[in-house]
Image (cartoon, rainbow, N blue to C red):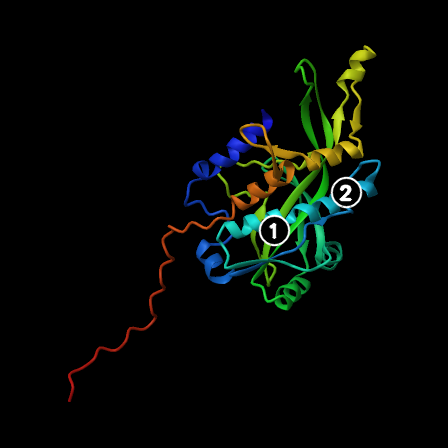
Amino acid sequence: MKRLVLILGLALLPLINGCARNHFNVPQDNVVDQVKTLGLVPIIVDADSDIRHPQRDELIALATAQNRLHERDLLRLLKNTNSFYTVTMLDADPNALFRELLSRRERRDDAAIQYNKYFFKTEALTSLVSKNNLDAVMLVVVSGITRPEKISSSNLLDSLETDYNYLIMTAQILDRKGNIIWEYPNFRTRFLSYTPVLNLQYPDFDEARANMSPKIQVKFKALEGIKRALDERRRDLLLRETSEVDLYMTQFEAMTSLLEIDRDRKPAPVAEKSQQEPAKGPKP
């Protein structure tokens, strides 16, 4: 049911937001005129973020491997937006590049949305964009964050509201001067929403009930279970398995739905000339 709601929400997103909605941080005309070639950095895993899983190193390696398997789907969706003349995947080590570019990270709570926001070194960013003959670059980061959530049991008879450790995905498009042209989560929508990639923990209602204990333990999911969740395929209306991985495609579609240019927008007004041309006099 939750998956169906997400799919319907994504399908209705263009209608809810309206065709003329600009989700960029700059006028759309600027994007069309100035960002023709976009470079996609291979998806980064922020190993120094708040990832609390007891098998932390193995989880980071798993997330890195999963990113390599599915990032081409994001590249395809970016091209399908037709918002850029060219979108290309950069041939780079994402972790090494991240260390080179990163200035700082901040844990943010904006409009009740908790996420990690990243700031990058302008000089290193300019070098990356120029070296690859780009107009802008897109950086997508998988990171860990701990945030409050209320989770109910499968029979809806019990619930536990506490802090849980999540994997989340954030993204930014930056130009060669370090200006943030676009970001995800995106705060330019009428209705704010932001879905984490995966909750790494769960409340063990069954154990508490079996022991007749009022205290519900919060446990970390097994690494094998996390991998199965990251591998889970979508199903079509006939419940047949498709080639698309659900958790990744949910994130990618949420991003790219906010990257489409409104082709019916009115062009920006042309600035009037400061001096009028002299009137032509009669020929001698």
The dot on residue 198 is none
Q: What residue type is labelled 1?
A: Gln
Please tell me whether residue 220 is drawn above or below residue 50 in the rendered image: above
Q: Give neighbour class at mark 1: few <14, some 14-19, many 20+ (Cα, 10 Å).
A: many
Secondary structure at numbered mark 2: helix
The dot on residue 62 is 2
Q: Where is residue 270 in the image (x, y as percent from the top left)?
A: 35, 63
Residue pictured at 58% horizontal, 37% vertical: 111
Residue pictured at 73% horizontal, 31% vertical: 164
Residue pictured at 44% horizontal, 57% vertical: 29
In the picture, which quadrant includes the N terminus?
top right
Q: Position of residue 159 (x, y in %)?
A: 69, 18
Q: Quadrant of residue 186?
A: top right
Residue at the farthest bottom position: 284
Q: Position of residue 183 (x, y in %)?
A: 58, 48
Please tell me whether residue 260 is drawn above or below residue 110 in the rendered image: below
Q: Where is residue 192 in the image (x, y as percent from the top left)?
A: 54, 37
Secondary structure at numbered mark 1: strand
Residue linked to disc 1: 172
Q: What residue type is labelled 2?
A: Leu
Choose between 146 and 77: the one closer to the eye.
77
Please tell me whether residue 222 is drawn above or below residue 98 in the rendered image: above
Choose between 94 and 174: the one closer to the eye.
94
132 relative to 202 in the view: left or right: left
Choose between 216 and 69: the one closer to the eye.
69
